[in-house]
Amino acid sequence: MSHPGHSWENSLMERWWNDFKLIWLAKRARTETLEELEESVKESIEYCNTQRAYASKNGLTAEKFRVQTA
């Protein structure tokens, strides 16, 4: 939760949640159990970090971008 007047504090999580709903869940079958949902979240995090290229990161994945900037 962000402090009042500081909505940018929570913007990273809000962005991920938006991508998760619009990109990840929209293209998959609805989960039936909590375990399936947990597995879907883990797969989504793995995908976003290691496979999805971002235009804002010069076409690199988040993982490659972090390695490059370190």
Image (tube, rainbow, N blue to C red):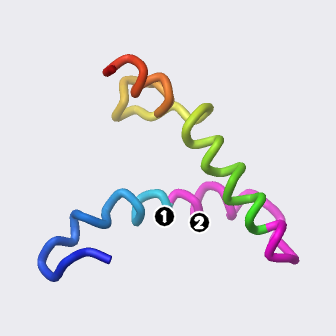
- The residue at 83%/69% (across/down) is 35
Residue 9: percent from left, percent from top: 24, 64
Left or right side of 3 for 27: right
Query: Looking at the image, which is closer to me, 70 or 28?
Result: 70
For the record, the magenta segment spans 19-36
Seen as rendered, the residue at the extreme top is 68
Seen as rendered, the residue at the extreme left is 5
Left or right side of 37 for 66: left
How many C-alpha atoms fall within 10 Å of the one at disc 1: few (<14), some, or many (≥20)? few
How many C-alpha atoms fall within 10 Å of the one at disc 2: few (<14), some, or many (≥20)? few
- The residue at 76%/68% (across/down) is 37
Q: Please tell me whether mark 2 sits on a helix, a strand or a loop.
A: helix
Query: Looking at the image, which is closer to me, 1 or 32?
Result: 1
Seen as rendered, the residue at the extreme front is 70
Left or right side of 31 for 38: left
The residues bearing labels 2 and 1 have C-alpha atoms spaced at a distance of 5 Å
What is the tally of numbered marks visible in this picture?
2
Seen as rendered, the residue at the extreme bottom is 4
The residue that label 1 is drawn on is 18
Q: Please tell me whether mark 1 sits on a helix, a strand or a loop.
A: helix
Residue 8: percent from left, percent from top: 22, 64
The residue that label 2 is drawn on is 21
Q: Are marks 2 and 1 in contact (CB under 8 Å)?
A: yes
Task: Give the quarter of the image for residue 27.
Answer: bottom right
Q: Amino acid at mark 2?
A: Lys
The quadrant of the picture occupied by the C terminus is top left
- The residue at 31%/62% (across/down) is 11
Residue 60: percent from left, percent from top: 46, 24
Left or right side of 11 for 23: right
Residue 31: percent from left, percent from top: 82, 71
